[in-house]
Amino acid sequence: MSADPIVVLIAFKIQPGRESLATQVMTSLIATVRKEEPACSGITMIRDAADPTRVLLYELWPDR
């Protein structure tokens, strides 16, 4: 019997004016996690279209 996948949601705000730098850093971090954590099924960064300082990371893992 396989376990249900785990969804991790991380919501945060970027300091105004640092959106570009934060996006670059988070993109690099996501790539590192995907490379070093083979169990990771995916990480998606979602930015609020109305407020670019608001970000949601959606992570999918097969189990704890």
Image (cartoon, rainbow, N blue to C red):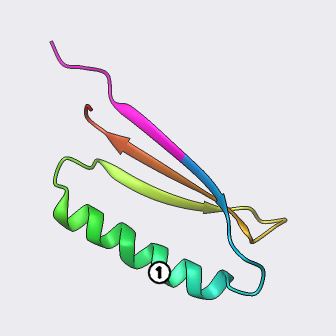
- Left or right of 58: which side holds 55? right
Question: Residue drawn 38% across and 78% down?
Answer: 28
- Left or right of 16: which side holds 11? left
- Tell me the residue that label 1 is attached to: 25
- Left or right of 64: which side holds 2? left
Residue 48 located within the stretch drawn in magenta: no
Q: Measured along the vertical axis of the image, is residue 32 above or below residue 9? A: below
Q: Measured along the vertical axis of the image, is residue 59 above or below residue 14? A: above
Question: Residue drawn 68% across and 85% down?
Answer: 18
Q: Position of residue 8 (x, y in %)?
A: 46, 41
Q: Regarding mark 1 in the picture, which secondary structure is present there?
A: helix
- Left or right of 6: which side holds 21? right
Q: Measured along the vertical axis of the image, is residue 40 above or below residue 14? A: above
Q: Measured along the vertical axis of the image, is residue 21 above or below residue 27? A: below
Q: How many marks?
A: 1
Stretch in magenta = 1-9
Question: Residue drawn 18% across and 19% down?
Answer: 2
User: Which quadrant, please, contains the C terminus?
Assistant: top left
Question: Residue drawn 50% across and 84% down?
Answer: 24
Q: Classify residue 23 by image quadrant.
A: bottom right
